[in-house]
Amino acid sequence: MSSEDTAKSSIFIRNASVIILLLMPIAALGTRFGIWPFTIGLLMFAVSMLGSVLIQITNAIWLFRKPASGTTSALRWASLFAFPPLIIVAVTLTNMSKGYPPIHNISTDRENPPQFTEAATQRGSDSNPLEYSSELASVQHSAYPDLSTVLSNDSVVETYEKALALCLENGWDVYGKSPEKGLIEAVDTTFWFGFKDDIVIRIQATETGSKMDLRSVSRVGVSDVGVNANRIRQFVASFKS
């Protein structure tokens, strides 16, 4: 290969790395705004990550052979542009290694989980079902044994108002409010892909005050890689603080 062909190849790789970098936000935002389904968005995202890995491997081999200075500059720029997707690859592999179970329906009360009343009107026909089975409860208990009912010395009314304020503070879209039943229903939307997870909060009276249970369910996907459990943990931590 002539030096001119080599230079053109390095420039091609640099330009390809720019496209791969831009493909990440395009894939996510296209999904969020409904331009294409989430399956297409995730496929584009996967192509971006795979492309970044291939570019980094190609550049490492090429740079090891000490090419001409002009070629080296283009390859280094290509490695720089392909670096952000590579970080996503590393984070994804790290999450996969944690062994999150293939569940997306999490409740603080596994025996009698809070029930949605308004979510059916918000979720599409292709959304995940809302049923919470004993098998699911067993898997959840093994994966997230720390999640449990939150006890409070406050009255039902006080706990309800505090929980509702916290929902709004978190930026959740509250679409169901029933103070008399002690129920709050809301949806949390992810920033990039616009994935929606429905949340129901149930508040009941106790002899010493009240108790609160939360349930968070993803509309799409199989494994939530711990997102719903972490959402509940963060909410409970904020509520207690």
Image (cartoon, rainbow, N blue to C red):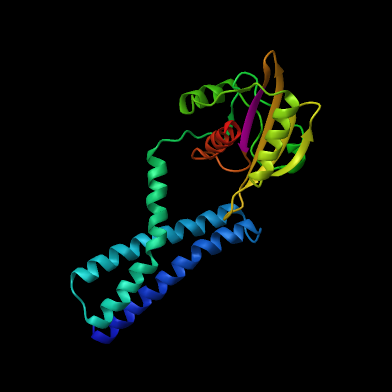
Q: In this view, does 37 lie to the left or right of 176?
A: left
Give coordinates of residue 165: x percent, y percent.
70, 39
Give coordinates of residue 162: x percent, y percent.
69, 34
Say above or below: 107 vs 193: above
Give coordinates of residue 87: x percent, y percent.
39, 56
Query: From this viewpoint, is residue 115 visible?
Result: no
Q: Residue at x 53, y 62 (%)?
A: 25
In this view, the residue farthest toward the left is: 65
Between residue 149 and residue 14, name the one nearer to us: 149
Q: In this view, does 219 lie to the left or right of 143?
A: right
Magenta span dominant secondary structure: strand
In this view, the residue farthest toward the right is: 180
In this view, the residue farthest toward the top is: 207
Between residue 174 and residue 17, name the one nearer to us: 174
Q: Which residue is drawn at 75% across and 27% down?
A: 157
Q: Which residue is drawn at 51% across and 56% down?
A: 43
Give coordinates of residue 143: x percent, y percent.
47, 28
Is residue 222 inside the magenta stretch?
Answer: no
Kindly indicate the quadrant of the structure image that contains residue 173.
top right
Kindly indicate the quadrant of the structure image that contains residue 76.
bottom left
Query: From this viewpoint, is residue 35 visible?
Result: yes
> Bounds of the magenta span?
211-217
Kindly indicate the quadrant of the structure image that contains residue 205.
top right
Say above or below: 172 vs 101: below
Q: Residue at x 58, y 54 (%)?
A: 193
The C terminus appears in which quarter of the rendering?
Answer: top right
The N terminus appears in which quarter of the rendering?
Answer: bottom left
